[in-house]
Image (cartoon, rainbow, N blue to C red):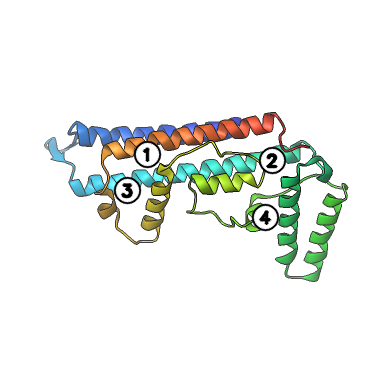
Amino acid sequence: MITVRHNFLKQKEEIDLFFNFLDEIINHDARLIIDPPANTIKTIKVETIAVMKSSFILMLYNCVESTVVNCLRAILRVIEGDGCKYNDLIDELQIASLAAYDYNVKKCESKDEKNKSLKQQIDFQTGLSVFHLDLRSLMSSSSQGNFSGSLDAKEIRKIFSLLALDLSTMRCDELVQVKNCRNKLAHGEVSFEDYGRNYSIQYLQVSKDHTLTYLNDLISNVDKYLTLKDYRR
Protein backbone atom coordinates (compact mmCIF):
# COMPACT_ATOMS: atom_id res chain seq x y z
CA MET A 1 0.00 0.00 0.00
CA ILE A 2 3.03 2.29 0.15
CA THR A 3 2.86 2.86 -3.60
CA VAL A 4 -0.91 3.42 -3.49
CA ARG A 5 -0.57 6.08 -0.80
CA HIS A 6 2.39 7.69 -2.56
CA ASN A 7 0.40 8.01 -5.80
CA PHE A 8 -2.56 9.43 -3.91
CA LEU A 9 -0.44 12.01 -2.09
CA LYS A 10 1.12 13.05 -5.38
CA GLN A 11 -2.32 13.63 -6.91
CA LYS A 12 -3.45 15.42 -3.75
CA GLU A 13 -0.46 17.74 -4.03
CA GLU A 14 -1.37 18.58 -7.64
CA ILE A 15 -5.02 19.16 -6.70
CA ASP A 16 -4.05 21.47 -3.85
CA LEU A 17 -1.68 23.33 -6.15
CA PHE A 18 -4.40 23.94 -8.73
CA PHE A 19 -6.93 24.93 -6.09
CA ASN A 20 -4.56 27.43 -4.49
CA PHE A 21 -3.96 28.98 -7.91
CA LEU A 22 -7.72 29.30 -8.46
CA ASP A 23 -8.12 30.81 -5.01
CA GLU A 24 -5.46 33.42 -5.76
CA ILE A 25 -7.27 34.41 -8.94
CA ILE A 26 -10.76 34.55 -7.44
CA ASN A 27 -10.18 35.81 -3.90
CA HIS A 28 -6.98 37.80 -4.30
CA ASP A 29 -7.39 39.23 -7.81
CA ALA A 30 -4.25 37.59 -9.18
CA ARG A 31 -3.36 38.79 -12.68
CA LEU A 32 -1.09 37.81 -15.55
CA ILE A 33 2.07 39.76 -16.34
CA ILE A 34 2.98 39.33 -20.00
CA ASP A 35 6.65 40.03 -20.72
CA PRO A 36 8.13 41.01 -23.11
CA PRO A 37 7.83 43.62 -24.38
CA ALA A 38 6.05 45.92 -21.98
CA ASN A 39 5.15 44.04 -18.78
CA THR A 40 1.49 44.12 -19.76
CA ILE A 41 -0.84 43.20 -16.89
CA LYS A 42 -3.98 41.31 -17.88
CA THR A 43 -6.99 40.34 -15.81
CA ILE A 44 -7.97 36.68 -16.16
CA LYS A 45 -11.36 36.46 -17.84
CA VAL A 46 -14.42 35.16 -16.03
CA GLU A 47 -14.89 32.63 -18.84
CA THR A 48 -11.37 31.30 -18.30
CA ILE A 49 -11.95 30.95 -14.56
CA ALA A 50 -15.16 29.00 -15.24
CA VAL A 51 -13.27 26.58 -17.50
CA MET A 52 -10.62 26.14 -14.80
CA LYS A 53 -13.28 25.32 -12.20
CA SER A 54 -14.68 22.54 -14.38
CA SER A 55 -11.17 21.24 -15.01
CA PHE A 56 -10.56 21.19 -11.28
CA ILE A 57 -13.59 18.95 -10.69
CA LEU A 58 -12.29 16.59 -13.37
CA MET A 59 -8.99 16.40 -11.49
CA LEU A 60 -10.92 15.40 -8.38
CA TYR A 61 -12.81 12.63 -10.17
CA ASN A 62 -9.65 11.30 -11.81
CA CYS A 63 -8.11 11.03 -8.35
CA VAL A 64 -11.15 9.09 -7.13
CA GLU A 65 -11.04 6.58 -9.96
CA SER A 66 -7.28 6.05 -9.92
CA THR A 67 -7.22 5.60 -6.14
CA VAL A 68 -10.03 3.02 -6.24
CA VAL A 69 -8.31 1.11 -9.05
CA ASN A 70 -4.95 1.18 -7.27
CA CYS A 71 -6.53 -0.09 -4.04
CA LEU A 72 -8.27 -2.96 -5.82
CA ARG A 73 -5.12 -3.97 -7.67
CA ALA A 74 -3.16 -3.87 -4.42
CA ILE A 75 -5.66 -6.21 -2.78
CA LEU A 76 -5.49 -8.72 -5.64
CA ARG A 77 -1.70 -8.52 -5.71
CA VAL A 78 -1.31 -9.10 -1.96
CA ILE A 79 -3.72 -12.05 -1.91
CA GLU A 80 -1.84 -13.69 -4.77
CA GLY A 81 1.50 -12.95 -3.09
CA ASP A 82 0.22 -14.59 0.09
CA GLY A 83 -0.16 -17.83 -1.83
CA CYS A 84 -3.83 -18.23 -1.04
CA LYS A 85 -5.67 -21.22 -2.42
CA TYR A 86 -9.41 -21.58 -2.87
CA ASN A 87 -10.08 -23.06 0.58
CA ASP A 88 -8.00 -20.35 2.26
CA LEU A 89 -10.33 -17.59 1.08
CA ILE A 90 -13.46 -16.20 2.72
CA ASP A 91 -16.76 -17.00 1.03
CA GLU A 92 -17.06 -13.64 -0.71
CA LEU A 93 -13.69 -14.04 -2.42
CA GLN A 94 -14.44 -17.62 -3.41
CA ILE A 95 -17.66 -16.47 -5.06
CA ALA A 96 -16.00 -13.51 -6.77
CA SER A 97 -13.12 -15.68 -8.00
CA LEU A 98 -15.34 -18.37 -9.50
CA ALA A 99 -17.53 -15.74 -11.16
CA ALA A 100 -14.42 -14.24 -12.73
CA TYR A 101 -13.22 -17.63 -13.97
CA ASP A 102 -16.69 -18.30 -15.44
CA TYR A 103 -16.53 -14.94 -17.19
CA ASN A 104 -13.12 -15.77 -18.67
CA VAL A 105 -14.40 -19.12 -19.94
CA LYS A 106 -17.47 -17.58 -21.58
CA LYS A 107 -15.50 -14.90 -23.40
CA CYS A 108 -13.13 -17.45 -25.01
CA GLU A 109 -13.48 -17.55 -28.77
CA SER A 110 -11.72 -20.83 -29.54
CA LYS A 111 -12.05 -24.32 -28.10
CA ASP A 112 -8.38 -24.36 -27.04
CA GLU A 113 -8.77 -21.06 -25.15
CA LYS A 114 -11.89 -22.34 -23.45
CA ASN A 115 -10.22 -25.59 -22.39
CA LYS A 116 -7.26 -23.64 -21.02
CA SER A 117 -9.52 -21.35 -19.00
CA LEU A 118 -11.54 -24.29 -17.70
CA LYS A 119 -8.35 -26.02 -16.55
CA GLN A 120 -7.26 -22.85 -14.73
CA GLN A 121 -10.62 -22.73 -12.96
CA ILE A 122 -10.52 -26.41 -11.99
CA ASP A 123 -6.92 -26.19 -10.76
CA PHE A 124 -7.80 -23.21 -8.57
CA GLN A 125 -10.99 -24.72 -7.18
CA THR A 126 -9.28 -28.04 -6.36
CA GLY A 127 -6.29 -26.37 -4.71
CA LEU A 128 -3.72 -27.15 -7.39
CA SER A 129 -3.03 -23.46 -8.01
CA VAL A 130 -3.04 -20.27 -5.96
CA PHE A 131 -5.30 -17.25 -6.28
CA HIS A 132 -4.64 -15.26 -9.43
CA LEU A 133 -7.18 -12.75 -10.64
CA ASP A 134 -6.92 -9.60 -12.71
CA LEU A 135 -9.07 -6.57 -12.01
CA ARG A 136 -10.82 -6.60 -15.39
CA SER A 137 -12.08 -10.15 -14.90
CA LEU A 138 -13.24 -9.40 -11.37
CA MET A 139 -15.22 -6.32 -12.38
CA SER A 140 -16.57 -7.67 -15.66
CA SER A 141 -18.01 -10.73 -13.92
CA SER A 142 -19.80 -8.65 -11.29
CA SER A 143 -22.87 -6.46 -11.43
CA GLN A 144 -20.60 -3.41 -11.16
CA GLY A 145 -18.99 -4.10 -14.53
CA ASN A 146 -16.92 -1.30 -16.03
CA PHE A 147 -17.05 1.46 -13.43
CA SER A 148 -15.43 4.16 -15.55
CA GLY A 149 -17.31 7.39 -14.82
CA SER A 150 -19.66 5.77 -12.30
CA LEU A 151 -17.87 6.06 -8.97
CA ASP A 152 -19.48 7.68 -5.99
CA ALA A 153 -19.49 6.56 -2.34
CA LYS A 154 -22.40 4.14 -2.88
CA GLU A 155 -20.79 2.50 -5.91
CA ILE A 156 -17.40 2.26 -4.21
CA ARG A 157 -19.05 0.59 -1.23
CA LYS A 158 -20.63 -2.03 -3.54
CA ILE A 159 -17.36 -2.75 -5.31
CA PHE A 160 -15.36 -3.36 -2.16
CA SER A 161 -18.16 -5.47 -0.68
CA LEU A 162 -17.23 -8.05 -3.35
CA LEU A 163 -14.06 -8.56 -1.32
CA ALA A 164 -15.87 -8.39 2.05
CA LEU A 165 -14.42 -4.99 2.85
CA ASP A 166 -17.10 -3.04 4.70
CA LEU A 167 -17.16 0.70 3.94
CA SER A 168 -20.66 1.34 5.26
CA THR A 169 -19.49 3.92 7.79
CA MET A 170 -17.72 6.03 5.15
CA ARG A 171 -19.67 8.88 3.58
CA CYS A 172 -18.92 11.55 1.02
CA ASP A 173 -22.06 13.12 -0.42
CA GLU A 174 -20.00 15.41 -2.66
CA LEU A 175 -18.81 12.45 -4.74
CA VAL A 176 -22.18 12.21 -6.50
CA GLN A 177 -21.88 15.74 -7.84
CA VAL A 178 -18.20 15.25 -8.75
CA LYS A 179 -19.15 12.10 -10.69
CA ASN A 180 -22.09 13.80 -12.44
CA CYS A 181 -19.90 16.74 -13.42
CA ARG A 182 -17.29 14.41 -14.89
CA ASN A 183 -19.87 12.59 -16.99
CA LYS A 184 -21.60 15.72 -18.30
CA LEU A 185 -18.26 17.21 -19.34
CA ALA A 186 -16.86 13.95 -20.75
CA HIS A 187 -19.99 13.33 -22.84
CA GLY A 188 -20.24 16.90 -24.08
CA GLU A 189 -23.62 17.55 -22.46
CA VAL A 190 -22.43 20.93 -21.23
CA SER A 191 -19.45 23.16 -21.94
CA PHE A 192 -16.63 23.62 -19.43
CA GLU A 193 -17.42 27.32 -19.27
CA ASP A 194 -21.14 26.93 -18.63
CA TYR A 195 -20.67 24.24 -16.00
CA GLY A 196 -17.91 26.07 -14.14
CA ARG A 197 -20.03 29.19 -13.78
CA ASN A 198 -22.35 27.34 -11.39
CA TYR A 199 -19.77 26.71 -8.67
CA SER A 200 -18.09 28.99 -6.16
CA ILE A 201 -14.57 28.60 -4.87
CA GLN A 202 -16.11 27.74 -1.49
CA TYR A 203 -18.00 24.83 -3.02
CA LEU A 204 -14.85 23.59 -4.71
CA GLN A 205 -12.97 23.68 -1.42
CA VAL A 206 -15.62 21.65 0.39
CA SER A 207 -15.70 19.11 -2.46
CA LYS A 208 -11.92 18.89 -2.45
CA ASP A 209 -11.53 18.50 1.29
CA HIS A 210 -14.29 15.92 1.70
CA THR A 211 -13.25 13.90 -1.35
CA LEU A 212 -9.58 13.75 -0.38
CA THR A 213 -10.44 12.84 3.21
CA TYR A 214 -12.69 10.05 1.93
CA LEU A 215 -9.94 8.66 -0.30
CA ASN A 216 -7.37 8.82 2.48
CA ASP A 217 -9.77 6.86 4.72
CA LEU A 218 -10.33 4.34 1.91
CA ILE A 219 -6.60 3.67 1.66
CA SER A 220 -6.40 3.26 5.45
CA ASN A 221 -9.28 0.76 5.42
CA VAL A 222 -7.70 -1.26 2.62
CA ASP A 223 -4.35 -1.22 4.43
CA LYS A 224 -6.01 -2.54 7.59
CA TYR A 225 -7.87 -5.22 5.59
CA LEU A 226 -4.59 -6.47 4.13
CA THR A 227 -2.60 -6.20 7.34
CA LEU A 228 -5.17 -8.28 9.24
CA LYS A 229 -5.51 -10.64 6.26
CA ASP A 230 -9.27 -10.33 6.36
CA TYR A 231 -9.38 -12.07 2.98
CA ARG A 232 -8.48 -15.36 4.68
CA ARG A 233 -10.82 -17.66 6.58
Task: Report the front residue among 119 and 141.
Answer: 141
Q: Tell me the quadrant of the picture where the N terminus can be found.
A: top right
- Amino acid at circle 1: Ser
- Local secondary structure at mark 1: helix
Q: Find disc 3 in the rendering and name its residue.
A: 54
Q: Find disc 2 in the rendering and name its residue.
A: 77
- Local secondary structure at mark 3: helix
The picture places residue 175, in percent across and down from the top left corner, at 43, 44
Q: Viewed as shown, does residue 115 lie left or right of 69?
A: right
Are the two marked residues, 2 and 3, in contact with CB atoms closer than 8 angstroms? Answer: no
Q: Find disc 1 in the rendering and name its residue.
A: 207
Q: Viewed as shown, does residue 162 lie left or right of 171?
A: right
Q: Earlier in the sequence, mark 3 or mark 1?
A: 3
Q: Earlier in the sequence, mark 4 or mark 1?
A: 4
- Label count reads 4
Q: Earlier in the sequence, mark 4 or mark 2?
A: 2
How many residues crowd around disc 3 within 10 Å: few (fewer than 14), some, or many (20 or more)?
A: many
